[in-house]
Amino acid sequence: MSAVFFFLAAIGALAGAIGVVMLRNPFYSVLSLVFHLISLAALFLLLRAEFVAAAQVVVYAGAVMVLYVFVVAYVGGGEELPSGGGLRILGPLFALVLAIELCIAMLGSALKGISGKGAPYVPGFGSPRQIGTLFLTKYLFPFEVASLLLLVAAIGAVVLARRRRGLEPDEEFETALHKPVSRRVGSMAESVGARRDS
Amino acid sequence: MATTTFAWIVLLCPLVGTIVIGASFKVLKGRTAGVIGTVAIGLAFAFAIATLISLLRHGPQQRELTSSVWDYARTLNIDARMSILVDPLSVFMMLVVTGVSMLIHLYSVAYMASDRGYTRFFAYLNFFVFSMLLLVLAANFILLITGWAFVGAASYMLISFWYRRTTATRAGLKAFVINVVGDVGLVLGTFFIFGHTGTVDFIKTFHAVPHVFAQDSPDLVAGALLLLVGAFAKSAQVPLHTWLPDAMEGPTPVSALIHAATMVTAGVYIIARMHVIFELAPAAADVGAIVGGATLLIAASIGLVVTDLKRVIAYSTMSQIGYMVMAVSVGAYSAGLYHLMTHAFFKALLFMAAGSVISAMGGVQSLDRMGGFRKAMPFTFVMFLVGGLALSGLPPFSGWLSKDDIIGFLDHRGGGFLILGIVGYIGALMTAIYTFRMIFRTFFGEPVPEARELQDGHLHHVEKPVNPANGDVEDFDVGFPGPEHHIAERAMPMKLAMSGLAVLAIIGGAGQIPGIDHALSSFLDTTFADSTIIRHEPSTSAAWIGLVIGAAVALAGIGIAYRVWIVAPGTSAKLIERFGPVHRFLINKWYFDEAIDFVIVRPTLWFGRFCNTAIERVFVAGVITGGTVSIVRACGALVRRAQTGFLRYYAAAVLAGITLTVLYFLITSS
Amino acid sequence: MAIGWYLVVSALIFVIGAAGVLTRRNPLVILLCLELMLNAANLALVAFARLHGNADGQIFALIIMVVAACEVTVGLGLIVAMYRRKLPIDVDELNELNG
C-alpha cells in the first residue's frame, strides 16, 4: 500500500519538477513548484518525518511560495525568449551526465551499504516532540544562528527593495546654503566694500 | 695601569672627540670645536707618552703586548678579534701620529677660524686620527684593513672638505678610487697569506710564515706583491700616485697631517710591520725597493718644474716616501722609520708655512705670482727656511741624519742596492734644488703687490673669491673657504705649532747620531729582532763618510738653486726654452694621468656602457623582467576569458565541477 | 519501499533543477529551480534519517528550509530592485561583472 503512495508521490514530484523547468510562463512555474512541494511533503510523511512534512507545507508551500507569487505578480515576467548560446544543448547534457553518475553511484555501489529494511526506530521518531527536544538541546546553536540568519535576510530584503525617496540629501537645505548673499547686508565694513568675503 | 690600557685610552680619545664634536655640532660656537679637538689629541699624546714609559719598564724581550676586547668571529678557524698590539713599532708610530696631529690641530684652530665648516673640520680631523691610530695599533689583519679603509674615507672627506668646489670633489673621488685599488690589493694579499697560515693575528702569522712558506714561494710572493699594491696606493708611489698632487685641493692642515705626516706613511708602516713576509719573499721586496727608487726620481723631477706651491711640497712628499719605502724594503727598518719621523716634522712645518704664505696671497697658490715675502712675513720665512734646510739634508738638521742613514745602509748592502744608493744621492740633489727654488721664488726677489700690502700692515683681502685652479666664481658660504685668511704672524696658535715643529726638525735627529747614540734603533730592535737583514748595519766610519757626502750634495743643490734663481734670474726661462720637450714632459707629470685614463678609465667606462646597453637593457630589463611580465600578463588574459559575466556559464562550470568530483569519488571508492 | 528508490527520486529532482538553472533566462525561474535542488537534498537527508533511525537528518532538513527561505527572500528582493531600476529581467543581459 505504501508503495502505491510512494509511486504517486514520486511521480507527482517529478512531474512538478519538470513543469518548473519546462513551462514558459513563470507564474505557471511557481504553481508547478507548489504542486511539487506538496508531493514532496507526502514523501516525507512516508518516511515518518511528520514535522518536516508539516513544516514543508506550512512554511515552504505556504509562505515562501506565496512570496514568490507576489513577486511574480509584481515583476511580471512575460513570455520568455528561448535561451540562447551553447547552453541550450549543453545544459541538459551536463545534467544528464550527472544523473547517470548519481544513479550509478546509488544503484551500483552505494546500495550495497544500505539495507532495504530500514532501521528499527523508536516510536516518536519524527514527531514534533523529538524534533523540539533535539533543537533545544543538541542543536541549540544552529537553531539560534538560523534565527539570526532569518533576521539578516529580512533586513536585507527590506534594504534591497526599498524606495529611495525618504533618504535623499535634503535639497532645500543645500540650496539655502549656497544662495548668494546680497552685498549690501552685513557689517559696515562689508557695505563699504573693505571686506571681500561674503 | 697596564700598558695596553694606556694604549686603549690613546685610541679612544680621538674617537670620543669626534663623537662629541659631531653630536654637538649645532651648539658649538666660535672656536670651541677646535679646542675640543686639540685637547682630545693632546690627551691622546699624553697617554701615548705614558704608554711609552710603561712599555720601557718591561724588559727588552717582553715588549710585545696584545690586548683583546672582544671576538668578532670564531668560525672556520678565523680568529678575528678586536685586539691591539703594543710593541715598539706601534708605540713609535703612535707617538709620531699623536704628536704631529696635536700640533696640526693647534695650527688649524687659528687657520680655519673663519670657515663656515669649522666644526665639521675638527670632527673629521679627529676621526682621521682615530682611524690612523687604529691602523697602527691593529693586532690582526682585519683591524688593519678596517683602519686602512677608515683612513681612506677620512682622507676623502677632508680632501673634498670644500665640497662645493668641483675641483676638490673630483680630487677627493680620485683619491678614494685609487685608495680602493690599494684596499683590494691589501685584502687579496691577506687572503693569500691567510690561505696558508690559517690565522689573521699578526704575531701568530709571523711565527707561522717561515714554517709554512718556502723562500720566494709563489703564493707568498703574490701575497707580498698585493700587500705592496696596498702600500703603494696609500703612500702614493708610482703608478698609484696620481691622487696625491690633486689632494692638495684640501685645506692646508689636511695636507700637512694626512698627506705628509701620517696617512701616506701607512704604506711604510705596513711594510715594516710585515717585514717577516717581505724578507722571506725577496722578489717582492726588491720590487718595493725599485718602485721606491723610481718614485723618488720621478717625483723629484716633477717637483723641479711645477708652479703650484703646495704641489711642489706634495711631490717632495712623494719623493721622500720613496726613500722610506726603499729603506724598509731592503731591511733598513729603523732608518726608514727614523726618516718617517723626521719627515713628519719638517714636512708638516713646510705645509704650515706654505699655508701662511697662501693666506697672505688671498688663496692663490701659484709660484708665478709670489715673490719677496721676506720682509713682510719674517716668522714664516724662518720657519720655511728651517723646514727647507731639514728637507734638503743639511747638517745639523734632522733630515740630514735620517736621509743619509738610509743611503748609508743601501751603500753598505752593496750589489744592486748600490745603484739605489746613487739614485738616493741624485734625488737628494734634486730635493735641495727644488726646495730652494720654492724658497727663493717665494721669499726673495721683488715683492709682489700682496707682499707690499702686508709690509704696510694690511693683509690682502679678496672681495670676490675665485677657485684658483679654474677661475670659477665662489662665495664665502659653507662648502667654500671662509672670508678671512690667517697668517702665522698674526695668530698665536699657528706660531706655537710651527715653532714646536721647527724645534723638532732641528733637534729631532739627536737620538740616532751614528757612533754617538742609537736610541731609536735600539728601541725598535725588539720588533725587528726576527729579521735576517738587519744585521747589515754600516760601521760608524762608513756612516760618517756617507753623511759628509750627503751634506756636500745638499750644499751643491742649494748652490745651483741660488745661481739659477737669485744670481741670474732669467736662467730658468732660458732653460725651459732650450729643453722645451723635456720641460713639457715633466710639467705634464710624465703623462701618468693620461696613461691611466687611456689604459684603465676609458676601457672601464666602455665596459660599463656596454653592460648597460647590451646586458642591462636588453637582457635583464627586456628578457627577464619584460619576459616575466608578459608571461604573467598572458596568463592573466587567459584566465580573464573565463570571467564572461554570464551567470549561466558560471553555473555550468559549477555543475561540471560537481560532476567531476562525483566521478572521482565513484572511481576511488569502487 | 527500499531507501534506494527515494534516493533515485532525489537525484532525479536535483538533476532536473540543475538543468533548469542552466537553461532558463528568467532569474525568477532560476531561483525556482534552485529551490528544486534544495528540496532534493532535503529528501535525501530525510531518507537517510529514516534509514538510521536518527532524527538529525530531519533537523538538518529543517535548517535547510530556513536557509532556503532566507535565500529566496534576498533573491526576490534583488529582482524587485532590478525591476524598479528598469533593468532587463534576463540573466544574459546582466553581464557587466566580467573581467
Image: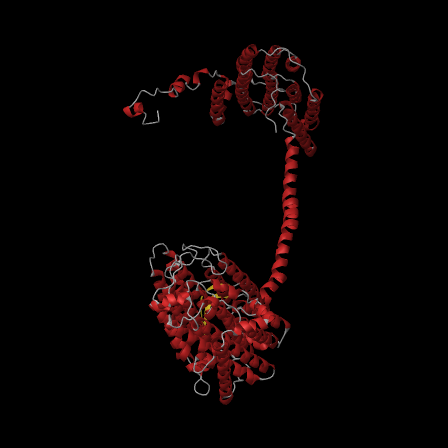
Q: Is residue B151 left or right of residue B240?
A: left
Q: Position of residue B414 (x, y in %)?
A: 58, 84
Q: Position of residue A78 (x, y in %)?
A: 62, 10
Furthest toward the bottom, the residue is B541
Q: Position of residue C7 (x, y in %)?
A: 65, 22
Front in this rendered view, residue B636 or A120: B636
Q: Is residue A187 left or right of residue A122?
A: left
Front in this rendered view, residue B617 or A98: B617
Q: Quadrant of residue C44?
A: top right
Q: Is residue A113 visible?
A: no
In the rendered view, tell whether residue B512 sits above or below residue A4: below
Q: Is residue B351 left or right of residue C74?
A: left
Front in this rendered view, residue B320 or B26: B320
In the rendered view, tell whether residue C20 sits above or below residue B541: above
Furthest toward the left, the residue is A188
Q: Quadrant of residue B621?
A: top right
Q: Position of residue B599 (x, y in %)?
A: 63, 62
By what rule are the colours in the image chosen?
secondary structure
The residue located at (59%, 72%) in the rendering is B579
Count of numbered labels shown in the rendering: 0
Front in this rendered view, residue A98 or B551: B551
The C terminus of chain A: image quadrant? top left
In the rendered view, tell whether residue B155 sits above or below residue B338: above
The N terminus of chain A: image quadrant? top right
Q: Is residue B218 visible?
A: yes
